[in-house]
């Protein structure tokens, strides 16, 4: 079994000590920051400054930081970000194996390196670098294609029409690439917010009070006691939650949190909506979308984004589909597990 220190991020100071001593040539900005946060005393600061060479100053600094708490370590790491970003980067590695943290354990909810997989062999893990690698690969492909097209035209006379066609091509390609990156960023943000709202209630309340999540989102809701009105009318009142760009799963999670009295089936349906948006089935477009959720006690609940041109009805398989779907024939049905998605077919 690994010792307790191996899981401590300060262990990285020991594992990377030679490189840190060699590359930290100026300690003054780091000392200023640590002294500002009262992480070191005046005597400790003078002790470091009194050393003759930059290697001795760096060595003494590391010795002192290693004896402090984790807060001092984090302040030290933050101070490296501007001066020595490559050193700051290595201090984000796995404290056990000194390797990049490339995976996220879904069970333990922690970052792990490839060597840590054996300790989590029965746990589901997702890559935290795959998305970035995909974006990097797509951009490299874009650059290669641009260069290739120009290379094939080298030394040739190109007509204005052909220039126009190539200009349209690169604009379209660039817009597609930009949309991919933007979508991934939105998904990551919404995954984080969704996880945030799964935390215990007190934690959610404190975070919600201290931050203004998704300033681009507006909320329309009929006032009154929602639970009482639900049981009187048989359904929740109509509500529209709008986001600027993409369906916001954080707002779906917030709705679940605000309505704990909803039937279990309705809560399960809303959780599945969050999963569907995050996983994004290829035939579903959550940008510029309008999702109407139909449940046991839910009716008229809409999550919208952008110009709302992509319309969907979502309900559990064992819940009767909305009447508007029965009456109209321009809907395509897609089943994702226990959820049915009705997509409006555009002419």
Image: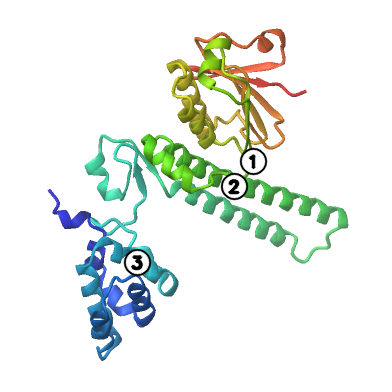
Residue 90's tag is: none
The residue mark sitting in front, 2 or 1, is 1
- Badge 2: how crowded within 10 Å, few (<14), some, or many (20+)? some
Residue with the mark numbered 2: 182
Relative vertical location of residue 119 with respect to residue 132 in this rendering, above or below: above
Instruction: Of the two numbered discs 3 and 2 on the same chain, state the one appearing first in sequence.
Output: 3
How far apart marks 2 and 1 lie (CA) works out to 10 Å
Label 3 or label 1, whichever comes before in sequence order: 3
Q: Quadrant of the C terminus?
A: top right
> Is label 3 or label 1 in front?
3
Above or below residue 306? Residue 339 is above
Disc 1 marks which residue? 245
Is there a contact, CB below 8 Å, between mark 3 and mark 2? no
Single out the residue that lies furthest toward the front. Answer: 224
Q: Residue at x 57, y 44 (%)?
A: 214
The crowd level at tag 3 (other Cα within 10 Å; few <14, some 14-19, many 20+) is: some
Give the secondary structure at mark 3: helix
Name the spot of residue 173 as percent of width and height, x first: 68, 49
Does residue 236 appear anywhere in the picture?
A: yes
Relative vertical location of residue 217 with respect to residue 10 in this rendering, above or below: above
| Residue closest to the far bottom | 52
The image shows residue 108 at horizontal and vertical percentages of 29, 40
- Say which residue label 3 marks: 75
The residue drawn where x is 68% and y is 37% is 306
């Amino acid at each position: 079994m690994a010792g307790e220190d191996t899981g401590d991020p300060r262990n990285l100071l020991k594992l990377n000590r030679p490189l840190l001593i060699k590359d930290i040539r100026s300690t003054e900005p780091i000392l200023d920051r640590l002294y500002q946060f009262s992480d070191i005393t005046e005597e400790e600061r003078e002790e470091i400054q009194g050393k003759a060479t930059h290697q001795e100053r760096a060595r003494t600094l590391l010795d002192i930081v290693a004896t402090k708490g984790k807060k001092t370590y984090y302040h030290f790491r933050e101070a490296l970000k501007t001066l020595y970003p490559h050193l700051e980067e290595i201090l984000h590695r796995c404290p056990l194996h000194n390797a990049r943290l490339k995976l996220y354990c879904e069970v333990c909810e922690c970052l792990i390196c490839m060597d840590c997989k054996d300790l989590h062999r029965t746990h589901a893990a997702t890559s935290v670098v795959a998305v970035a690698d995909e974006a990097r690969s797509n951009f490299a492909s874009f650059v290669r294609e641009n260069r290739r097209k120009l290379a094939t035209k080298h030394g040739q006379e190109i007509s204005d029409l052909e220039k126009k066609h190539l200009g349209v091509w690169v604009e379209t390609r660039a817009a597609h690439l930009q949309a991919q990156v933007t979508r991934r960023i939105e998904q990551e943000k919404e995954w984080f917010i969704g996880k945030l709202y799964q935390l215990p209630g007190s934690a959610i309340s404190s975070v919600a009070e201290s931050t203004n999540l998704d300033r681009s989102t507006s909320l329309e809701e009929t006032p009154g006691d929602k639970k009482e009105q639900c049981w009187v009318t048989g359904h929740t009142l109509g509500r529209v939650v709008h986001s600027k760009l993409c369906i916001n799963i954080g707002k779906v999670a917030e709705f679940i949190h605000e309505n704990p009295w909803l039937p279990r089936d309705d809560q399960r349906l809303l959780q599945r909506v969050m999963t569907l948006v995050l996983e994004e089935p290829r035939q579903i477009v959550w940008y510029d979308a309008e999702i109407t959720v139909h449940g046991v006690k839910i009716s008229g609940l809409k999550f919208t984004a952008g110009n709302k041109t992509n319309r969907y009805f979502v309900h559990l398989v064992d819940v009767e589909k909305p009447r508007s779907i029965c009456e109209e024939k321009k809907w395509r049905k897609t089943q994702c597990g226990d959820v049915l998605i009705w997509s409006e077919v555009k002419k």
